[in-house]
Structures are given as structure tokens and as C-alpha cells.
């Protein structure tokens, strides 16, 4: 209930602030649970991913520092977020999302690069997908990367790609992992081209 309420509130706020969001290829989103992955380009792109894939509900990873505030902790926990120690990630980083994907009607949003300032993919998403037996769905966000530009009502576009299935019965070799990660990267590029062939991501935080 709380997640549904928060999603309604987020949709209203996003519409009032920007009101220029577009979602492509929603028909490619599979039935059942899956892991939605994308390059992290803005602190609010996760919100657009979740809104675009509705009515599906999602869980999220959030840095553990955010859970120290009691009010924010309450909101995060009831919005299906779970804490992650980025410096010393423990077994729960894998066990929690795998358990939720298997036993709850919740998909997962992950950014394989870890932060919006890194473009290198990490293999954790592959392990979670294999253990949970769910597909990986690539997605990309194109649009404002700062609140200032978002308020200017610049166009926001989210595109979803074809699901990528991993054989849950076989252990992935290093070579297979690299092939799947390359497939995900290629899917990101394909989706970016679909939205705008001339798109180039610029990290304004480093400008």
C-alpha cells in the first residue's frame, strides 16, 4: 500500500515539475519479476524507470547512510529499499534481492555501474539474476540530469529493451559473464540510438 501511495505522489510531483515524460517499448517488459538495469545518469532516473514500468512494483538498493535518519529510514523501508554498505558489501547484497525476487511480487532496479559517475558494468546483477532465475531488462534514460534542467520541462524519454535470460542451472564462466555484460552494454547503445542517434551523455557533476 505504501509503495503504491508513494508512486502516486511521485507521479504527481514529476508531472508538476516536468510533465514531459515519454516511455518507449513498454510491451517488452516481461510478466513476473525481473531486474531492470540501466546506466545511472541522474539521481532521479530511478523514479522515471519505476514510473515507466508501472504497475510493476520494485525494490531498490540504497546506501546504508540514508537509513540513519529515522524518518527517511521509515520511508525507504516501506518503499521496498534495503541498505547496502558500499565500502564493505556483505552477503546480504546478494541474498536480500534474490530472496525478494523469488518470494515477493517485486522486481528490482539496479545500476550495474554502481554510481551515476561510472560507466563500467559490474557482475553482481548477473549473479542475482542467475540465482533468482529472473531475466534482465535493459533500460536507458535520456533527459535532464539536474533538477534545474528538469524544472525547465525539457523532454524526458525512457526506453526499455529486450529481456536477457541467464541459465540459472549453470555457473557462469568469466567469458560468459563478459559476453552478457557486453550484450547489456550493446542494448544500452541500441536504445540510446532509438531515442536519439546523436545522444551523448555528459556528466555535469564533472564539468
Image: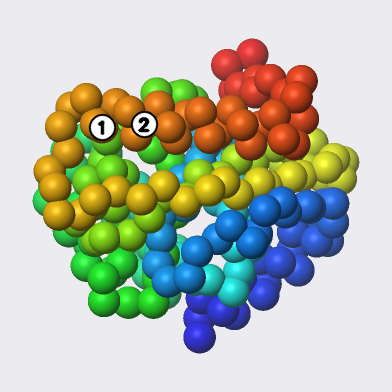
Distance, label 2 to label 1, CA atoms, is 6 Å
Q: Specify the color scheme.
A: rainbow
Residue indicated by mark 2: 181
In terms of image quadrants, where is residue 134?
bottom left
- Of 151 and 156, nearer the camera is 156
- Number of numbered discs present? 2
Label 1 sits on a secondary structure element that is helix
> Residue 45: x and y, percent?
60, 46
Q: Determine the secondary structure under disc 2.
A: helix
Q: Residue at x 31, y 67 (%)?
A: 101
Tell which residue pokes out farthest to the top in this image.
Answer: 207
Q: Is 70 drawn above or below residue 91 in the view shown?
A: below
Q: Is residue 9 above or below residue 204?
A: below
Classed neighbour count for the residue bearing mark 1: other residues with Cα under 10 Å, few (<14), some (14–19), many (≥20): some
- The residue that appears at 83% across and 42% down in the rendered structure is 155
The answer to which image quadrant residue 141 occupies is top right
Q: Return the residue nearer the eye: 53 or 206.
A: 53
Answer whether labels 2 and 1 touch (C-beta < 8 Å).
Answer: yes
Q: Residue at x 50, y 44 (%)?
A: 138
Provide the residue designation for mark 1.
Answer: 177
Question: Which residue is the extreme one toward the bottom?
Answer: 1
Q: Position of residue 34 (x, y in %)?
A: 41, 60
- Residue 70 visible from this viewpoint: no
Residue at 53% x, 35% y is: 187
Tell me the quadrant of the picture where the C terminus can be found: top right
Amino acid at each position: 500500500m505504501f509503495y503504491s501511495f508513494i508512486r502516486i505522489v511521485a507521479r504527481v510531483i514529476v508531472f508538476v515539475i516536468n510533465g514531459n515524460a515519454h516511455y518507449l517499448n513498454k510491451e517488452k517488459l516481461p510478466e513476473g519479476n525481473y531486474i531492470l538495469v540501466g546506466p545511472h545518469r541522474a539521481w532521479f532516473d530511478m523514479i522515471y524507470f519505476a514510473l515507466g514500468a508501472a504497475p510493476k512494483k520494485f525494490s531498490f538498493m540504497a546506501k546504508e547512510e540514508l537509513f540513519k535518519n529515522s524518518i527517511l529510514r521509515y520511508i525507504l523501508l516501506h518503499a521496498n529499499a534495503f541498505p547496502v554498505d558500499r565500502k564493505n558489501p556483505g552477503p546480504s547484497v546478494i541474498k536480500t534481492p534474490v530472496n525478494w525476487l523469488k518470494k515477493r511480487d517485486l522486481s528490482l532496479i539496479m545500476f550495474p555501474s554502481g554510481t551515476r559517475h561510472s560507466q563500467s558494468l559490474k557482475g553482481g546483477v548477473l549473479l542475482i539474476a542467475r540465482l533468482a532465475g529472473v531475466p534482465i531488462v535493459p533500460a536507458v534514460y535520456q533527459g535532464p540530469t539536474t533538477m534545474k534542467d528538469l524544472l525547465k520541462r525539457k523532454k524526458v524519454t525512457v526506453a526499455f529493451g529486450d529481456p536477457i535470460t541467464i541459465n540459472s542451472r549453470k555457473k557462469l564462466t568469466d567469458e560468459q559473464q563478459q559476453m552478457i555484460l557486453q550484450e547489456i552494454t550493446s542494448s544500452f547503445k541500441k536504445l540510446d540510438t532509438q531515442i536519439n542517434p546523436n545522444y551523448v551523455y555528459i556528466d555535469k557533476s564533472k564539468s
